[in-house]
Structures are given as structure tokens and as C-alpha cells.
Image (tube, rainbow, N blue to C red):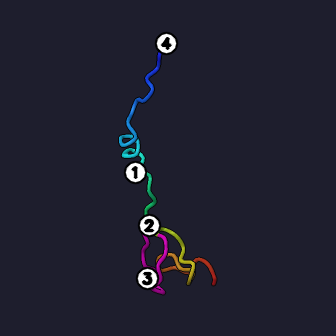
Amino acid sequence: MANPKRRFSAARRDTRRSQWKLKAPGLSICPQCKQHKLPHRVCENCGYYGKKEVVEV
């Protein structure tokens, strides 16, 4: 059976693929040392999670 040579145009294909872009991570600020950190994770700078020290730095 014959198949269509071009199902979608290049513009249509590229429009669909244009949504595959990276986003910057959403950062929050540590309440102890005021450095940027990923939300819901221990701060790498001071070792605090919320108001408790979890890791010794």
C-alpha cells in the first residue's frame, strides 16, 4: 500500500517540538543562612531543614 510522503509540514513538526525546552529550577531561600536551595531539601550550605539542623556541615 502506498504511504504519504509527507504527513506533516516541517513548520507543523517544528512547532510541536518547540515546547521541549528546559526551565530554570524553582529555588527557595533558606531561613537560616539566606542562600538559595531547592525546595523540600536540606540546605547544602548550613545543613538545616526548616528550623532543625539535620546534617553537620
Disc number lying in front (3 or 2): 2
Query: Residue 54, image x and y in percent?
Result: 58, 77
Q: Which residue is mark 4?
A: 1
Q: In the rendered structure, which segment of residues is drawn in magenta?
A: 26-38
Which type of secondary structure does the marked residue at label 2 adopt? loop
Write down the quadrant of residue 8 in the picture.
top left
Q: How far is disc 2 from disc 1 in space, using C-alphas?
A: 17 Å
Asked whether residue 48 is drawn in magenta, I would say no
Amino acid bearing label 1: Ser
Q: Earlier in the sequence, mark 3 or mark 4?
A: 4
Q: Are marks 3 and 4 in contact (CB under 8 Å)?
A: no
Residue 50 vertical position relative to residue 24 in the rendered view, above or below: below
**Residue wearing tag 3:** 31
Query: Alpha-carbon neighbours of circle 1 within 10 Å: few (<14), some, or many (≥20)?
Result: few
Q: Which residue is mark 1?
A: 18
Q: Compare marks 2 and 4 and give the one earlier in the sequence.
A: 4
Sequence-wise first label, 3 or 1:
1
Question: Mark 4 belongs to which amino acid?
Answer: Met
Secondary-structure class at tag 1? loop
Q: Nearer the viewer, residue 25 or 43?
A: 25
Q: Residue 18 appears at what percent x and percent y?
A: 40, 51
Q: Main secondary structure of the magenta part?
A: loop
Q: Which residue is mark 2?
A: 24
Residue 11 drawn at (x, y percent): 36, 43
N-terminal-most mark, 3 or 2: 2
16 or 28: nearer the viewer: 16
Disc 3/disc 2 C-alpha distance (Å): 21 Å
**Of marks 2 and 1, which one's residue comes earlier in the chain?**
1
Mark 3: few/some/many CA within 10 Å (<14, 14-19, 20+): few
Instruction: Report how far apart the C-alphas of labels 3 and 4 lie in the structure.
Output: 66 Å
Give the mark nearer the N terminus: 4 vs 1. Answer: 4
Rendered view: 21 above or below 25: above
